[in-house]
Image (cartoon, rainbow, N blue to C red):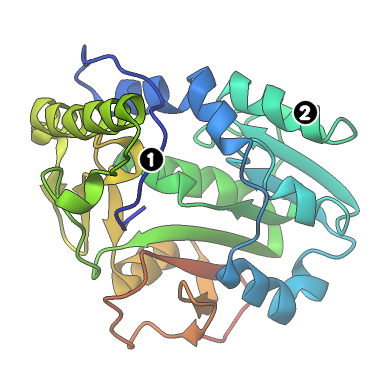
Amino acid sequence: MAVCKGARILHINFAMPSDLDTLNQRFYLSRSVADWYATKAFIFPEEQAFLALHGVEAVDGKNVLDIGIGAGRTTRFLQPRAARYIGVDYSPNMIAAAASHHPEATLHVRDARDLSAYKDGEFDTVMFSFNGIDCLSYEGRLAAMKEIQRVLKPGGWFIFSSHNRDQKTPGPFAVCNLSFSKHPLRMLAHLLRYLKGIVNRWKTKSLAYAGQGHEMRHDSSNIFAAPICYITKAAQRDQLAVLGLEMISIFDRAGKATSVAEFDQTSSWILYVCRKGGVTERA
């Protein structure tokens, strides 16, 4: 996330591989992260806004592919409304956690960059929530979007969230990254996490860069383990347009409908609602 807040220690291991995919997989494939995600059982304001405006058309009675489900947070509110629901995540631990909460759901271990298990035009709707697409390299992000476009039916819906480049984020030395506790052992754990973030950022700083309309930026969501993608709304619109995906609605973190033209330095991330082909409206 783009805001400072305390979090539990997920793991303390200062040895670091050097490439982005390995770093992200090392973080998100761990059992401790899956356990942490299993505590998430809420729906974001922007997701509520999407369902209120487009849920009947995009979710109810539809074939839905839910990517990056973590421990099944989105399964809880999408599966009951869909005619057919498939949830996927590239972490076996995440899928195991999701299956324990939703034993009736169809869940697969899949990588968003390779959806070859699914046919062209198989789904009415694809959702990729909680900024999961930002954890891929920029090239991986494009590969995932191409696969998503392929498995969508003409006129199909693609809903995803992505970090907002226009928001400023604190670096690893920021005091807001350090939680405080009167309990000595908890305070030690908080301090170790804070120091880990500093070390992680130092060891992976070469992977961060600023591009045209986007940047690979470190933040506290993964303890600065690897940079993640932050992108402007205009750059995201253009990236989607190349793939034949058009923005229909945009929601900020408060669930307010917004537009590409509206400058936003407050929202940590933005929710984009898009459609494949045959759509003439533009956000």
Which amino acid does the dot numbered 1 rest on?
A: Cys
- Residue at mark 2 to residue at mark 1: CA–CA distance: 23 Å
The residue tagged with tag 1: helix, strand or loop?
A: helix
From this viewpoint, is residue 90 visible?
no
- Quarter-of-image position of residue 18: top left
Disc assigned to residue 99: 2
In the image, residue 163 sits, relative to residue 39, either above or below, namely below
Q: Nearer the viewer, residue 17 or 190?
A: 190
Residue at the spot x=61%, y=20% of the render? 92
* Residue position marked by numbered label 1 in the rendering: 135
Tell me which numbered mark, 2 or 1, is placed earlier along the sequence. 2
Query: Which mark is in front, 2 or 1?
Result: 2
Q: Residue at x 19, y 65 (%)?
A: 168
Residue 215 in view here: yes
Looking at the image, is 114 positioned above or below residue 154? above
User: Height in image: 55 above or below 136?
Assistant: below
Q: Is residue 135 left or right of residue 263?
A: right
